[in-house]
């Protein structure tokens, strides 16, 4: 258990120390809010800034969780994983430590944006909302840390991984409804969006941030807070179940895969490390 | 003496390729053991298998009586490893790296402080404790890694080319630490190196080539067996000298006006020289080096690993 805690603390320390990274991780979300908020001014949404912000927060949590968990690749490239490998530390604990630190930092980033967002448009009327928002962020953070760690264990080359990661996160982010409302997507892309777990995560999170959980399903559809596939509405409960299942599957997969990965086979070079952190 | 590392009939195959072919050797407790060989000889495969990173194909490998493939956890607790490339966490300080290591090795919390102080003193890094690893020089990083490899008081310390890429002064220091360790704590040191003069300081040497151990002995015995001292002689009277050498059945080669004579039969050479002494203008005797041993055995020059 000490191993889990030590690795968790290590992730937090790295986050706090990387001031430049922190600032940029905050600039981009607000840039997106501004740009997309201006492009997709929408009549049927009451509070476009809050609508946009909630999407941006959850994509930030998603992206950081994925990036941080997969930065295990960086630990392989830098050799740190080799040190872990020859130690008696249990691999399961190492995997858990990496997962939890990624999820925690991702949640912290989400909270930071939320705090700043509260000055420009997000308002909670119920005392319980911040609590549920936090829970959802932690939940999404853990789910996508699992995905990230799983990807990391499948990597053989740091440079290729950078490309693969971008190729995975970009479409998942842009076809999730976070920036671009699903109703504005062409049919073919909308179909892709339906297969995207982030679509459900975004809808679910947005519903909680905007405090619309009490609305009936038809009202939620009208406000774009529930995914509807050919007239079939995925209710919030079903959404939650979908994410939970994806999360459990990837947590299991990533842990098993991590325990069985041969890290010594990793392609190591200085350029790899640069490509990963550049 | 008690063998702390025992390797019997160890073979490692990658598909059809045999990296290590049925090797056996023992390492005595408290000794410094050097593993030499050209690139691709199977050294790294052997050291990585002993460190529980690779799986063997067949054979028995024991460290402190524990099987490296079946009692991984016990073996890992008993060994310290310093890899050729840095495995430090560059984004953390020296102290944080050492503390992390203590967590991985289950060092009791109340001992951590004392142990960090001890290992840092050993490698003279007490004042650098709070420095970020990314700000350290190559030599300092290597010292931190040696300190880290020792903090859980291992019985065997594996050093994979501990001095490659370091300047001569740092190399000398690293060796000082290694020797100090062996004396003070009776730790067994298993190392690979490319520097022949370093191999000579060790108690025992094994030379690998093509997946097998081609020589295994003390440096002195290997040198005696595989090298010859050579005399380089300049003379004013070449004809008389050549006749003398022929008469005493000494083999020689002539190059740039020098006669190179194998000094294997020292008495005969001395006789020749005493007869011929008034004509000799210059003379030099070269001792056989460990590099000669290596060349003689493997037929290859040691190269820096890329």
Image (tube, coloured by chain):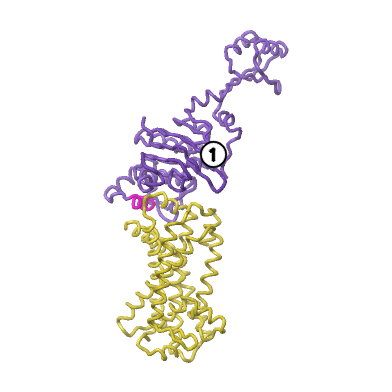
Chain colours: A yellow, B purple
| Above or below, comparing residue A66 to residue B112 in the picture | below
In magenta segment, residue B62: no
Q: Is residue A26 left or right of A4 when viewed as pictured?
A: right
Q: Quadrant of residue A213?
A: bottom left
Count of marks overlaid on the render: 1
- Residues B46 and B17: in front is B17
Can you give x and y, in whole percent of width and height, for residue B128 in the image? Answer: 39, 48
Bounds of the magenta segment: B95-105
Can the viewer see residue A111?
Answer: no
| Above or below, comparing residue A24 to residue A175 in the picture | above
Can the viewer see residue A260?
Answer: yes
Q: Residue furthest right?
A: B239
- Residues A143 and B133: in front is A143
- Residues B298 and B135: in front is B298
Quadrant for the C terminus of chain B in the image: top right
Quadrant for the N terminus of chain B in the image: top left
Can you give x and y, in whole percent of width and height, for residue A13 in the image? Answer: 39, 61
In magenta segment, residue B97: yes
Q: Give the secondary structure at mark 1.
A: loop
Neighbor class of circle 1 (other Cα within 10 Å; few <14, some 14-19, many 20+) is many
In this figure, which residue is indicated by the disc labeled 1? B211
Name the residue rendered at 61%, 32% in the picture: B299
Can you give x and y, in whole percent of width and height, for residue B290 in the image? Answer: 54, 29
Q: Is residue B99 left or right of B299 when viewed as pictured?
A: left
Name the residue rendered at 40%, 81% in the picture: A238
Can you give x and y, in whole percent of width and height, for residue B122 in the image? Answer: 37, 40
The chain carrying label 1 is B
How would you classify the magenta stretch by its main secondary structure? helix
């Amino acid at each position: 258990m000490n191993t889990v805690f030590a690795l968790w603390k290590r992730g937090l320390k790295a986050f706090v120390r990387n001031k430049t990274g922190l600032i940029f991780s905050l600039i981009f979300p607000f840039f997106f809010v501004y740009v997309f908020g201006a492009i997709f001014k929408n009549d049927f949404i009451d509070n476009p800034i809050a609508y946009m912000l909630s999407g941006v927060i959850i994509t930030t949590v998603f992206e950081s969780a994925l990036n941080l968990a997969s930065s295990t690749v960086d630990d392989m490239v830098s050799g740190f994983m080799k040190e872990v490998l020859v130690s008696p530390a249990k691999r399961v604990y190492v995997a858990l430590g990496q997962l939890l630190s990624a999820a925690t930092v991702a949640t912290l980033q989400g909270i930071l944006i939320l705090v700043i967002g509260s000055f420009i448009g997000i308002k909670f009327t119920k005392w319980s909302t911040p609590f549920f928002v936090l829970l959802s962020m932690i939940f999404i953070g853990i789910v996508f840390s699992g995905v990230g760690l799983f990807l990391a264990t499948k990597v053989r080359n740091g440079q290729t991984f950078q490309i693969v990661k971008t190729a995975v996160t970009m479409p998942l982010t842009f076809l999730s409804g976070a920036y671009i409302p699903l109703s504005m997507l062409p049919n073919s892309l909308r179909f892709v969006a339906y297969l995207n777990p982030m679509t459900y995560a975004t809808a679910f999170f947005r519903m909680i941030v905007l405090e619309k959980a009490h609305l009936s399903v038809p009202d939620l559809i009208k406000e774009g807070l529930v995914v509807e596939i050919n007239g079939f509405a995925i209710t919030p409960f079903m959404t939650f179940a979908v994410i939970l299942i994806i999360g459990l599957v990837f947590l299991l997969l990533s842990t098993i895969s991590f325990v069985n990965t041969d890290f010594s086979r990793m392609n190591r070079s200085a350029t790899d490390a640069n490509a990963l952190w550049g | 003496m008690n063998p702390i590392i025992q390797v019997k009939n160890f073979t490692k195959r990658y598909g059809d390729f045999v990296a290590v072919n049925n090797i056996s050797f023992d390492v005595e407790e408290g000794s410094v053991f050097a593993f030499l060989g050209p690139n691709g000889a199977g050294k790294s495969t052997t050291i990585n298998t002993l460190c529980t990173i690779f799986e063997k194909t067949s054979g028995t490998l024991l460290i402190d009586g524990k099987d490296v493939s079946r009692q991984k956890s016990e073996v890992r607790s008993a060994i310290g490893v310093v890899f050729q490339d840095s495995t430090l966490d560059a984004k953390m300080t020296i102290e944080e790296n050492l503390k992390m290591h203590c967590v991985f090795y289950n060092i009791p919390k109340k001992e951590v402080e004392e142990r960090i102080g001890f290992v840092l003193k050993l490698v003279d890094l007490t004042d650098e404790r709070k420095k970020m690893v990314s700000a350290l020089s190559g030599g300092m990083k290597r010292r931190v890694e040696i300190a880290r490899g020792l903090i859980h008081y291992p019985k065997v310390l594996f050093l994979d080319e501990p001095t490659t890429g370091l300047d001569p002064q740092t190399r000398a220091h690293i060796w000082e630490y290694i020797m100090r360790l062996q004396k003070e704590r009776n730790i067994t040191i298993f190392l690979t190196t490319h520097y022949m003069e370093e191999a000579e300081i060790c108690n025992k040497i094994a030379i690998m080539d093509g997946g097998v151990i081609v020589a295994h002995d003390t440096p002195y015995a290997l040198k005696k067996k595989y090298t010859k001292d050579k005399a380089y002689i300049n003379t004013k009277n070449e004809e008389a000298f050549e006749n003398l050498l022929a008469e005493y059945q000494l083999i020689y080669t002539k190059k740039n006006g020098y006669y190179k004579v194998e000094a294997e039969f020292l008495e005969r050479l001395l006789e020749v020289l005493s007869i011929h002494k008034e004509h000799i203008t210059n003379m030099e005797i070269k001792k056989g080096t460990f590099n000669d041993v290596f060349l003689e055995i493997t037929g290859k020059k040691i190269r820096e690993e890329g």
